[in-house]
Amino acid sequence: MSPKAIVAALPLAPVLSTPDRLKDLLFSAASNLVAAVVILILGFVLSRWVGRWLERTLIHSRRIDATLVPVSTTTVRYGIIAVTLIAVLGRFGVQTTSLIAVLGAAGLAIGLALQGTLSNVAAGAMLLFLRPFRVGDYISAADTGGTVREIGLFTTVLIDADLIYISVPNSKLFSSTIINYSREPTRRINFTVGIDYEDDIEKAQAIILDLLTSDPRVLRDPPPATPVGSLGASSVDIIVRCWTATSDYWSVLYDLQKKVKLALDKAGITIPYPQHVVQFRDVSGGSLPAAPPQVQTKP
């Protein structure tokens, strides 16, 4: 059979006119647009739903640290959104493989231009890996302090004692000295009480030590102590030292300072004001007074 005969035997494809082709193109574009919008809406709705579900699940899980919850949920949301955008572009015939390569090159260029911003992400990852603090800890760092509420990709959120919202860049936080007041289960209370030189030192120590041992919030190990810290200019300084649970630190400190003052007053032991001795000299050549007067000055 000759080639001409074979060609003649093949069925002829219908030839579409220009209006028909335009209709097909418009229908295809409209269908792709509708599908893209539907995929986009479903992707964003799914990302929010999955993010909230994952957050609730991780919060109630005993095996997952609360510090990892915000970062995990944010990463999952962004991942779903990225897959959604790739699927939308695929509906319009965009080659996703080439697109990923272009996005990689663009991401490299953007990363070089935003080194300072992206350093916060790296610092946040190191904070999550090293864990110098966790959500709920009270820390002091980067010239600020507060209770950690959230460790994000770019910033760490603190709430200070006045309930003020503080957002600290992760890079600044990671590069500074971090003081964590909540990390250890116990904490030492240490303050000084001055008594008059004429008062009985051992009696004052016994009164203070009795207050410390009678408070159930004060730990017995290590035992409390009341050593003489120094001989001041106008007082004998006794150190009040004990240990308590970190959660009870402030309440025990405030209560002990009040109780020590009231107990010493009841026992007749004086907490003196700073004193200065003033001598008056007669510049006309007269003799000095036999007993220079003492003037007490209040702080």
Image (cartoon, helix red, strand yellow):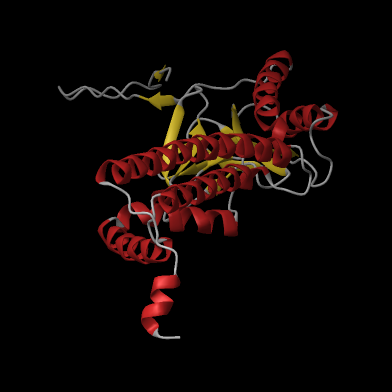
Picture coordinates of residue 21, whole percent (x, y)? 31, 46
Picture coordinates of residue 8, whole percent (x, y)? 39, 72
Question: From the viewer's perspective, is residue 132 above or below residue 283?
Answer: below
Residue positioned 59% across, 38% down in the render: 46
Q: Quadrant of residue 295?
A: top left
Picture coordinates of residue 298, whole percent (x, y)? 43, 17
Q: Left or right: where does residue 93 sit relative to residue 226? A: left
Q: Left or right: where does residue 221 sit relative to residue 40? A: right
- Looking at the rendering, in which quadrant would you find the C terminus? top left
Q: Nearer the viewer, residue 116 or 206?
A: 116
Can residue 257 be seen here? The reply is yes
Question: From the viewer's perspective, is residue 186 above or below residue 163?
Answer: below
Q: Nearer the viewer, residue 218 or 249?
A: 249
- Looking at the rendering, in which quadrant would you find the N terminus? bottom left
Q: Left or right: where does residue 66 sit relative to residue 277? A: right
Can residue 146 be seen here? The reply is no
